[in-house]
Image: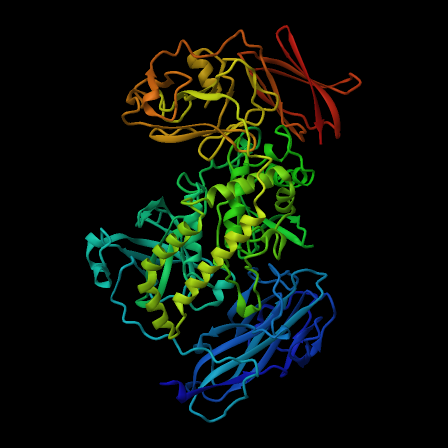
Amino acid sequence: MNAQETHWETIVSAGTTWKYIVPNTQPSDSWKNQSFDTSSWLEGPSGIGYGDDDDATQIPPQSISVHMRKEFQVLDTSQIKRILLDIDYDDGFAAYLNGVEIGRNLLSGNPINFNDLADGYHEAMLYQGNSPDRMFIDISLLQNGTNTLAVQVHNQSADSSDLSALPVLSVEVSGNEQIYNETPDWFDEPTLEPVHVDFVSSNLPIIILNTNGNDIPSEPKIAATIKIIDRPNDQRNYVTDQNKSDYIDHEGPIQIEVRGSSSSLFSKKQYALTTYDDAGEKDNVKLLGMPKENDWILSGLAFDTTFVRDFVSYKLSNSIGQYASRAEYCELLLNGEYKGIYMLLEKLKADDSRIDIKKVDEDDNTLPKITGGYITKADKIEGEEVEAWQMQNYAGWETKYAHEHPKPDEVTTDQHNYIQAVFFDLDQKSLDANVSLSDGYPSIIDIPSFVDFILINELASNPDAYQFSTFFHKDRRGKLRAGPIWDLNLSYGNDLFFWGLDRSKYNVWQFMDGNVGSKFWQNLFNEPNFKCYLARRWNQLTATGQPLSENKIFELIDQTVSLITEAVDRQELQWNFDIDFTSRINAMKSFVTQRIAWLSTELSDTSLCNQITTPPLVISRIHYHPPQSDDGDYEFIEITNNSSNTVNTTGIYFGGLGLSYQFPPGSSIGPNQSVLLANNADVFLSFFGKTPFDEYSRKLSNNSQEIRLLDGFGNLIDSVTYKDEAPWPVEADGAGAHLVLNNLGVDNSQALSWTRSFDYNNLSISDSNESQLFIYPNPFTKYLYVSLTNGQQIEKLNVYSLEGRLISSFNSSKNRDVFVVNNLSQGTYLVEVISGSKSYIKQLIRK
């Protein structure tokens, strides 16, 4: 049937009379069904709402929700070819046809309560001259005779200035005869139905999903199977290869659901899937060469008709040393139907090959275990997600946070309080522009990760950054890190233009424009030292030949375009729509040129951080694979002060992930002295007979790992990437030896600068060094972590008022211990630590 044989009419028009109620109690679950009695409801023409002067029927201001019903007649369903709902709303909605849900946005309850607030802001479009949201409806839901359209619209806040609800239902009718009503003036006829594509082969991997004909819901996941065709050596893949085991990358059972909020309105869905084995257990598998895991995303690349923005952004993040999801393009067949170009990528989660943190368990509620690891995000709160806390932003509303790990139903109160306090502490310290390495913002965050997160998102001019899809992670004993980046489809000049939005500009800072996110982003940018490091890093990364230079970005875009052009052509054929792919790619490149130029002008001053001198500390011993155990307990790292002056080590830490330690405030290493950091201080003392300086978290790789020693602002002090193969001494790989630097003056990044040693009697722990006491955090709330070096044991800890009155006393027999001090009011106290004949006193603040 061609376009001349059908036409569009509206079956539920704007201005038609609806039954409605502004509920103050929960309506019956049957309110959306056809048989429901609405005789007690009010009635009025649509739209219904208040504020903005765009509503035909006014309801009381500050209403949380309105529920609406409209009965309409269908004369002959066989004449109707397609049906779609255009809906203008503010802020969230759910719609039902004959009792069956047909769409929702920014409402995540199940069921939705009458007083549930919308998950985010969504402004009505029509009164601004823009088009409303649109979704196609399953035509099988229509019936001859009476049908019922039911809609509920909810506000984002109880004191919102407006609420709007204007649903319009239209149908594509056979022939030329007028049966129902004229379409509205603003109505744009949708494109033709997707064209059937005889999909035979692809230069990309082919993914075949089979749900036995079942529709994939938003939640919960349903059972399905997956088969991935990927011939070796970049050979062409054929659908018929699904029966040839040599060409199958993976096949097996999965659980799958539709994911995404706004993107779920599209016919081309996004999917989240989990791989299982035949016994029904989650199965960590390698897909298309990506490391083994069981949680994956199939992205339909919604809102981006270049199909490259997410992929390019993730690759750029990887190229500057920050993890972002690995991704591979593919083409998808779902139940035998061609769905187009997709991107298979890693779901963000705690995993050695993804966000490499030590997972915090439910029993980890005291120091140091309570310090990590965590994954937290700022985002819309939708579906099964639970809001953890809110933080104010400079735009006048809140940024919502959620626990990703541990999950909301697993996080303990102590853990929640701990990680929330980290964010609020950052907010305050950044507002105060406190740059102290002991208790300022550099003691809280990994500055390089925050800098890189800003630069990638600002290069892309991502309008959702900072407020939505913004992840953070914190390892045990580690600093808070920003990232990984996520969801950059609205970027590089692209936005939700059909919703009237145009925010991805080349000449704005996104943390100052639009969504903006929590206040600490602007606070950090306004602090001169942080801004200097931001500028210095930008100038390094955009230099000729560097990853964020224009030529390198264009090279990556061109490689990506070459890879996917064939699949894009097929997508255009299926959509029966020319997306003008080449012009869109050229527009993206032009944006990159403008954006780099603008950012380079804004980030030109590096005078505060150009001449940084780092201390002469050297990584001088590494015991990465002790033969006694693979759990890391016997590991150690030695750091040597290669100078004749004492080095203040306050704030110095191991950068990156996989190894966590930050030297305590006030710590130091004497002239030409060394300190040993152990993986497990108790095991080290028991086995080697000596007490290490302190203890780090995680374990070293038995194969290869980079150890990066950074100062408090993230400047590199020393870096070693050891390996378990020649020319590195192989005896250190589980054969009883450890790595020793030949000479402190040589380049320790070179394998030949290292030798192996079986001598553990000469470990550099000098009893002549003065013992050092560390008590942190300061200020504290409940827990005090106390550590004495050089084998000294804590015998007693006393807490005094400033007047000298003893308040609390604790006994111990360890060289490091955690004390619960929760009987103090806010204020300043003196803490005494007694060890043998020695007494140490420090002043601490209880907040």
Between 625 and 437, the one nearer to me in the picture: 437
Q: Which residue is drawn at 45% across and 10% down?
A: 689
Most distant residue in the right direction: 803
580 lies left or right of 452: left
Residue 373 place in picture, x, y as percent = 51, 37
Q: Tell me if residue 154 comes above or below residue 634 in the rendering.
A: below
Residue 358 place in picture, x, y as percent = 47, 35
Q: Tell me if residue 18 comes above or below residue 690 in the rendering.
A: below
Residue 277 seen in the figure: yes
Give the quarter of the image for residue 202: bottom left
Image coloring type: rainbow
Residue 706 place in picture, x, y as percent = 40, 31
Looking at the rendered structure, the number of numbered marks drawn on it comes to 0
Please identify the quadrant where the C terminus is shown.
top right
Give the quarter of the image for residue 507: bottom right
562 lies left or right of 429: left
800 lies left or right of 746: right
Most distant residue in the bottom direction: 177
Q: Tell me if residue 271 comes above or below residue 415 in the rendering.
A: below
Residue 407 seen in the figure: no
Please identify the quadrant where the N terminus is shown.
bottom left
